[in-house]
Structures are given as structure tokens and as C-alpha cells.
Image: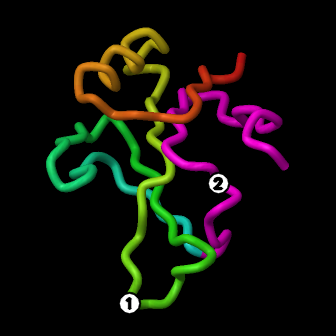
Amino acid sequence: MKLSEIVNPYPNEHAARLRDPALFDPDSWGRTNGGTLYGTIKVPVTIAIIWGKYKTANKASDPPIPQSLRFNKEKWTAEEAKAWLKENKVKYIAFEAAAK
């Protein structure tokens, strides 16, 4: 499946995909609310970070990599989420507004 074929299945969250999910080991997914992205970007607890390990680097000693950011639509509009990404210089490959 190509990234362009993926439809945001999340009715309650906007998603900013940082990397193609097809690159990740499906058994490695994790989620945190807030935290630090790329060692310097402070992510508020109202934004979830989806972490995973690459299929090619999924040993216990390999660190998880951020795959996407999820913005709760009750707290963020799609426009506010995009503005936060731009303000914090977070590059993403796709942005998907929450499903209707």
C-alpha cells in the first residue's frame, strides 16, 4: 500500500505522518501523550506521539522512532495543528484531518 492510498481512520484525531508506516514493524507501535521530539521539540500532552521501530531495526536495543503525531480534534482544529507543526518546524509527509 502506498502512503497516498492510506486514509486517516481516526475519527477523533488529526494525523501528521512523519514517516511512512509501511517502513515500521507492526508489532512495535507505542504511544505517548506529549514528550520530546528529535531531542529538542517539546510536544504538549494534548498531542500524541506514535512511536515504532523500523522493520530493519527492531531489536530490543534499537530506539523507537516517531512515526506520526496525533492531534485530538476536541483540542485542536486541523488549522491549529498545521500551525503548531509549522511554528515548531516539524516536517511531515502527509497531514490528514480527522474523519467526519
Residue drawn at x 73%, y 41% is: 3
Amino acid carrying label 1: it is Ser
Image point (32%, 20%), residue name: 86
> Could you tell me which secondary element the residue under label 2 belongs to?
helix
Bounds of the magenta segment: 1-27
Specify few, some or many for label 2: CA neighbours under 10 Å numbering under 14, 14-19, or 20 or more: some
| Place of residue 57 in the rendered image (x, y in percent of width and height, measured from the top left) | 52, 80
Residue 17's place in the image compared with 14, above or below, is: below
Q: Position of residue 90 (x, y in %)?
A: 33, 34
- Of residues 33 and 4, the one nearer the viewer is 4
Name the residue tied to disc 2: 21
Above/below status of 88 relative to 3 = above
Label number found at residue 33: none
Q: Residue at x 41, y 83 (%)?
A: 62
- Name the residue: 50% across, 52% down: 67
**78 vs 67: above or below:** above
For label 1, count other residues whose C-alpha is less than 10 Å away and answer few (under 14), some (14-19) or many (20+).
few
Residue 26 vs 50, above or below: the answer is below
Residue 94: where, in percent of width, then height? 58, 30
Q: Amino acid at mark 2?
A: Pro
Give the CA distance from mark 2 to mark 1.
Answer: 20 Å
Q: For numbered disc 1, what is the local secondary structure?
A: loop
In the picture, measured across the screen, residue 36 lies left or right of residue 20, that is left
The question of residue 93 being in magenta is answered with no
Q: Quadrant of the C terminus?
A: top right
**Drawn side of residue 58 relative to residue 46, left or right:** right
Task: Say which label, 2 or 1, has the lower sequence index.
Answer: 2
Is mark 2 in CB contact (under 8 Å) with mark 1?
Answer: no
Give the percent coordinates (x, y) of residue 72.
Answer: 45, 29
Number of residue marks: 2
Q: Which residue is mark 1?
A: 61
